[in-house]
Image (cartoon, rainbow, N blue to C red):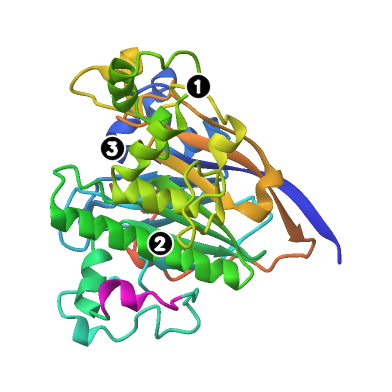
Amino acid sequence: ESKTKTTIRLLTFNVNSVSTVLQYYPMTRIPSSMRNLNTLFNWLEADIICLQELKISNPIISSQHGILSDYKCFLTLPKLKKNYSGVGIYVKKSLPIKVVKAEEGITGFLPVNNTSINNYKIIENSYRTSDSLSIGGYENLDIIFDNDIERALALDSQGRCIITEFNNGLIVIGCYIPANSIFSEEGLLFKMQYFKLIFQRIDNFQKAGKTVILMGDLNVCKDIIDREESLQVANKYFSNNTGNDIDPQLNYEFIKEKPERFFFNQQLMNSNFKIENNYKGSLLDSTRYIHPDRRKMYTCWNTLTNARSVNYGSRLDYILISKKHKNNILSSDILPEIQGSDHCPVFSDFLVSFENEILAEDKPLKFECKTFYKLINRDIMKMFGTK
């Protein structure tokens, strides 16, 4: 069969408010009338983009965030809390591979229509019950939230995850893992359940023969070299720690310090801390794969302390790729020159193959932004002379 290969650029960016990010470099270099996501994505030469922390609320999704001339758009927003969280996946329309299914959330219990989830008993159509829309891969998820559907919906109510499936067997998951920044026990439980759901679902997809890409703000550091504060503490106590070599024992201690770091490392092929019986190692941290020892490759900085100017940060943003495709990762890096958020973008250039067939016309998908949120394109409104 004739397979064609093409390179796609994957890009993840926690924008910390989609409306303000467009007011900073590089968008400041162009006239304000052209400052929009479509211009930004084209400028970054990105094909599949995942944005996190959109911070827009349902009634004010304007067409500027949901209808882009060159990109298909999928958005998940918190069901209850406004102006918080929110994840978007944008896919270039000219790509030779096409999205055939898109699912909101990670558990499969969210309704396929944009309806309330206050009473889960009256959700008629969820992704799990809708064969034509479901991406599948729900095995062994329910044990993670003790078969409690209300808990599953609570985990899925914060606008944190979108799953897209392409017609070449590629699955791209965009997500924003909870931070638990106040270090509460409930916050840690929520975060760990979320992590486990994502990686269990990825396991299921990979067992079914799919290629999986997970990208987003995962709110976890893989190694001690991914967190400046920990490195500086280590240097204080271990003065022999010079040069590029980190004592492996020091790194083990760093990873064991937090359950999410430990769990995350068991999922990665390029982990430095593998524990027998726990280790799965089915995904590759693409940026570390290209730059295995690079220091100060941070993606997030505290804005209150002006930490970015001295690069005192952490690496929390990742593009993880099924390990069997490691040779398809052509390049990957951070883009710290892009301003406007407390994070910077991360990209990976990835070789995908697809069958050389003539594709049918793209039908709008149910979870596509303009359909799901019933958006009206502003340009059409202009034709009718309305503001």
| Residue 168 included in the magenta stretch of the image | no
Q: Is residue 265 left or right of residue 348?
A: left
Task: Assess disc 2: are there few (<14), some (14-19) or many (≥20) residues with their C-alpha within 10 Å of its C-alpha.
Answer: many
The span picked out in magenta is 138-146
- What label sits on residue 173 in the rendered view? none
User: Which residue is identified by label 1?
Assistant: 245
Sequence-wise, which precedes: disc 2 or disc 1? 2
CA distance separating discs 3 and 1:
34 Å
Kindly identify which residue carries mark 2.
198
Residue type marked 2: Ile
**Quadrant location of the N terminus in the rendered image:** bottom right
Instruction: Give above or below for 18 relative to 371.
Output: above
Compared to residue 161, the image places residue 204 above or below, namely below
Label 3 vs 1, first from the N-terminus: 3
Q: Residue at x 38, y 20 (%)?
A: 28
Q: CA distance from mark 2 to mark 1?
A: 33 Å
- SS for callout 1: loop
In this rendered view, identify the residue nearer to me: 38 or 170. Answer: 170
Q: Nearer the viewer, residue 315 or 25?
A: 315
Query: What residue sits right under mark 3 in the picture?
Result: 16
Query: Would you identify the image quadrant in which residue 19 lies?
Result: top left
Q: Position of residue 192 (x, y in %)?
A: 29, 58
As drawn, is 60 to the left or to the right of 375? left
Which of pointers 3 and 1 indicates the residue nearer the eye?
A: 1
Going 29% across and 42% down the picture, which residue do you hit? 257
Q: Position of residue 185 (x, y in %)?
A: 14, 55
Q: Amino acid at mark 3?
A: Asn
Q: Return the x and y of residue 46 as percentages of the image width and height.
A: 55, 39
Image coordinates for residue 212, horizontal then vertical, percent: 56, 58
